DNA sequence: TACAAATAGTTGTTATGCTAACGGAAAAAT
DNA sequence: ATTTTTCCGTTAGCATAACAACTATTTGTA
């Protein structure tokens, strides 16, 4: 492979990821969701698998623990999530959506799914398959195997 | 297209972009480059096309102006870049690498290109073509056409 | 010419990503 | 049983991303 040819992949990847997030964030604002995209990701994960610890939730959201702690702080301020103590391990916390949080998720989830689709205009199912395979391969290639 | 199937593309994209940046940043640290990945991107762009204004450079780097201003501030602190006044428009500034900055770019550019390649193990030239096409299409799909 | 609109760069604010470090608690080792 | 190690969550510090607001300057227009 020619080295020069691949010099730009990082730029393209970064640029596209930021555009996707920005596009979603603008849609969130226009619909008065009063959430950031990342806060929504956390709530959505918590909705699918309730009562996780901070560490488990961070893992599932693809975020590190400090970042997740701060996002949870903001969601608690908004009354959408609550922390409870873990029954058997006093180091852990159990996180779950409040009733208000569950209501919110159910309200906005279909809308989010709808405008997310706009990214895939002019692209095929096969492209989606390529997309997942290539990006996951890159991710794996750059992940430390010692873990 | 099935909506559910595409719910995760944003997650994959974001996760991969962060991994790529993190991988590069770790390599930078191990080689004592004393630069962030974004600072390197700015320097590299400035090296290829010298004497740009803040706005032009931001555009080429895919960053917004406030972000670029702050990155340039840091690079100036390190003595790698300098701001000069624009000859014909007093609103503008002309940015360029210092001699020290040019030396640094030439020293580290080959190393960066080398470890960047690690992302593409187990992937083909055809995959790279798919990658560029798909991500650029997504970017275009989500870019406001009114500009 | 005078005034309104647009442009360039900066600064402020909030949120996130990453690393390091810290305190409390549990697990492992001796 | 005590010590050491590991683990969990949080906090702190720095850099970046996005947006709004501000100053200075230039351009467009009446």
Image (cartoon, coloured by chain):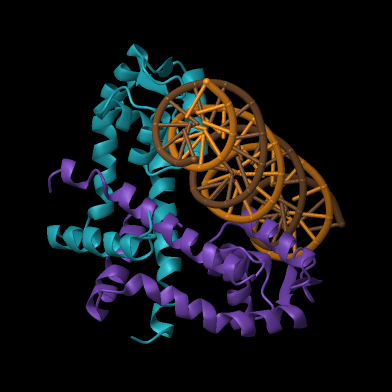
Chain colours: A cyan, B purple, C brown, D orange
Dividing the picture into quarters, in which one does residue B84 lie?
A: bottom right
Vertically, is A7 above or below D25? below
| Residue A51 x %, y % | 32, 22
- The residue sitting at 75% across, 80% down in the picture is B100
> Looking at the image, which is closer to me, A25 or B89?
A25
Name the side, left or right, on which A144 lies relative to A48. Answer: right
Residue C23, how many percent across, how many down?
64, 26
Left or right of residue B126, residue B85 in this image: right
Residue B77 in sight here: yes
Foreground residue, A22 or A64? A64
Q: Position of residue A64 (x, y in %)?
A: 46, 42
- Which residue is at a point 36% across and 34% down the rendered structure image? A56
Residue A85 falls in which quadrant of the image?
top left
On the image, the x and y values in percent for residue A120 come to 23, 54
Question: In the image, is B4 to the left or to the right of A5?
Answer: left
Task: In the rendered view, tell whether residue A112 sits above or below residue B66.
Answer: above
Quadrant position of residue A44: top left
Q: Residue at the top extreme?
A: A99
Q: Is residue B76 above or below residue C5?
A: below
Q: Is residue B3 visible?
A: no
Residue at (38, 42) in percent of width and height: A24
Count of labels shown? 0
- Residue name at image x 42 percent, y 30 percent: A54
Q: Is residue A70 above or below residue B92?
A: above
């Amino acid at each position: 492979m020619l080295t020069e040819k691949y010099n730009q992949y990082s730029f393209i990847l970064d640029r596209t990821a930021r555009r996707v997030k920005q596009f979603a964030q603008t849609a969130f604002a226009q619909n008065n969701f009063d959430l950031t995209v990342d806060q929504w990701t956390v709530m959505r994960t918590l909705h699918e698998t309730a009562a996780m610890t901070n560490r488990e939730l961070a893992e599932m959201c693809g975020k590190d623990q400090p970042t997740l702690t701060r996002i949870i702080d903001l969601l608690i301020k908004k009354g959408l999530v609550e922390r409870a103590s873990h029954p058997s391990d006093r180091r852990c916390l159990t996180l779950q959506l409040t009733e208000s949080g569950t209501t919110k998720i159910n309200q906005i989830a279909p809308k989010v799914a709808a405008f997310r689709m706009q990214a895939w205009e002019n692209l095929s199912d096969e492209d989606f398959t390529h997309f997942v395979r290539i990006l996951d391969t890159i991710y794996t290639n750059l992940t430390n195997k010692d873990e």
